Image: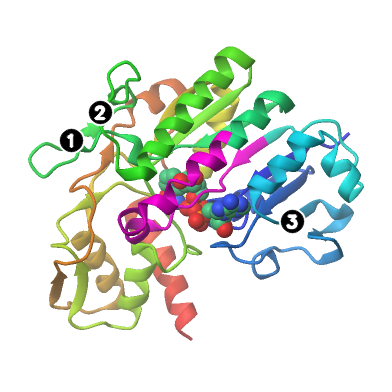
């Protein structure tokens, strides 16, 4: 029988890329849930025709292999916790248990949201707590929990003390301070993942993606926003802060490759970095995009904008040693793809 996977937050940036990847690379059924608070309607990005609608579910593709459920994932979890056959009874689907469960539903929103409305971001704690409670009862075959580089101690990311962050820089017996409520919720999520693996025998993998980017990312994120402004030949070119602050940018295709490999090899809740292992400043990103656009602008720093930590990048040695994985898409190649999309969007 074909497998059935569950993707929460399946209409967000990472979620919709994963839904598309699973749809293309497997014959399995994919159920994805999103309240569309940020995510985009699947009819705009799914390469499969709508077959029918039933209550809040939309069925797409041959054999109705894709099922989108529009609701707050916490409501889905309440329904599942009250009735383990909720999906079967409500939508007439036939399956025993979920195979892979990818949990991407979260309030994220970039720097403006992380610093500007931290209590809203803290709602991630409630989404994750409900999620792990259900996981430990349902016992799906495998679980993916996306933590974040924001879980790392901020004192290792300052202008005078920035190191390539290694997985061991998060130590639950000696905690540092993570980045705002966003980082706290991710640390808590990682802790719950360990508990799920150790006490409930759940196969769970945690990833700490650094700055994931891609062609279809929301314009509230810096990479596509800078690409769009370069494509419009902005002059002078605005940058948040001095622009010397840096991140470890990694293309979404690499993030997905590494995630799926990690799920095959890690089941005890261990968290791994996903990045290039390289620090790139925002000024360098602007330089790449304006070079692609064929001009050299004057830089205008916006010093009142939130910039977060000064330097956040990772050490990828552990991933290379344990998974034998390295990113394939260079910064220049990834940014070229984003730039081409920005030019296309401008037409
Ligand atoms: N994009 C990255 O580079 C990156 C880096 C580190 C960690 N992550 C993590 O990966 C996950 C996905 O991130 P993203 O970049 O795709 O973010 P995103 O905001 O694009 O996607 C999150 C999705 O969850 C949905 N959502 C939010 N609350 C919900 C709720 N209560 N019920 C149902 N749906 C809900 C939103 O509508 C959105 O579609 C998050 O947990 C994020 O912390 C992402």
The furthest residue to the bottom: 347
The residue that label 2 is drawn on is 176
Q: How many angstroms separate mark 3 from mark 2 (CA)?
A: 39 Å
Bounds of the magenta segment? 101-129
Query: What residue is rendered at 20% in x and 76% in y?
Result: 237
- Where, by quadrant of the figure, is residue 142 drawn? top right
Q: Which mark is residue 155?
A: 1
The reply to whether residue 208 is visible in this rendering is yes
Q: Of label 2 and label 1, which has the lower sequence position?
A: 1
From the viewer's side, name the closer residue of 126 and 259. 126
Residue 101 coordinates in the image, percent (x, y): 66, 36
From the viewer's perspective, is 98 left or right of 51? left
Decide: is 253 above or below 264.
below
- Are dots 2 and 1 in contact, CB under 8 Å? yes
Name the residue: 89% across, 53% down. Answer: 63
Of 268 and 226, nearer the camera is 268
Camera-nearest residue between 85 and 52: 85
């Amino acid at each position: 029988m074909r497998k059935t996977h569950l993707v929460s937050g399946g209409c967000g940036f990472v979620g919709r890329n994963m839904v598309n990847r699973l749809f293309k690379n497997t014959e399995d059924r994919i159920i994805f849930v999103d309240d569309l608070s940020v995510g985009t309607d699947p009819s705009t990005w799914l390469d499969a025709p709508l077959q029918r609608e039933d209550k809040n579910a939309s069925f797409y593709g041959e054999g109705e292999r894709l099922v989108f459920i529009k609701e707050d994932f916490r409501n889905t979890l309440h329904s599942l916790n009250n009735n383990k056959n909720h999906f079967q009874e409500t939508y007439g689907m036939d399956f025993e248990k979920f195979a892979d469960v990818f949990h991407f539903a979260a309030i994220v929103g970039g720097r403006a949201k992380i610093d500007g409305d931290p209590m809203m971001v803290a709602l991630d704690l409630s989404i994750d707590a409900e999620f792990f409670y259900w996981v430990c009862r349902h016992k799906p075959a495998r679980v993916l929990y996306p933590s974040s580089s924001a879980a790392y101690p901020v004192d290792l990311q300052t202008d005078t003390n920035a190191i390539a962050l290694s997985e061991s820089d998060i130590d639950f017996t000696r905690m540092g301070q993570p980045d705002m409520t966003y980082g706290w919720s991710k640390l808590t999520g990682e802790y719950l993942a360990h508990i799920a693996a150790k006490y409930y025998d759940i196969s769970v993998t945690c990833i700490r993606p650094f700055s994931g980017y891609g062609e279809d990312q929301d314009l509230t994120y810096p990479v596509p926003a800078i690409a769009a402004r370069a494509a419009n030949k902005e002059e002078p070119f605005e940058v948040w802060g001095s622009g010397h602050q840096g991140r470890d940018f990694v293309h979404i295709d690499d993030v997905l490759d590494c995630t799926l490999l990690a799920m095959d090899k890690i089941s005890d809740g261990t968290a791994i970095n996903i990045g290039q292992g390289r620090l790139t400043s925002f000024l360098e990103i602007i330089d790449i995009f304006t070079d692609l656009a064929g001009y050299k602008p004057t830089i205008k720093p916006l010093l009142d904008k939130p910039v977060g930590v000064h330097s956040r990048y990772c050490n990828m040695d552990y991933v290379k040693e344990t998974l034998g994985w390295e990113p394939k898409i260079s910064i220049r190649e990834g940014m070229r793809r984003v730039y081409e999309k920005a030019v296309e969007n401008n037409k």
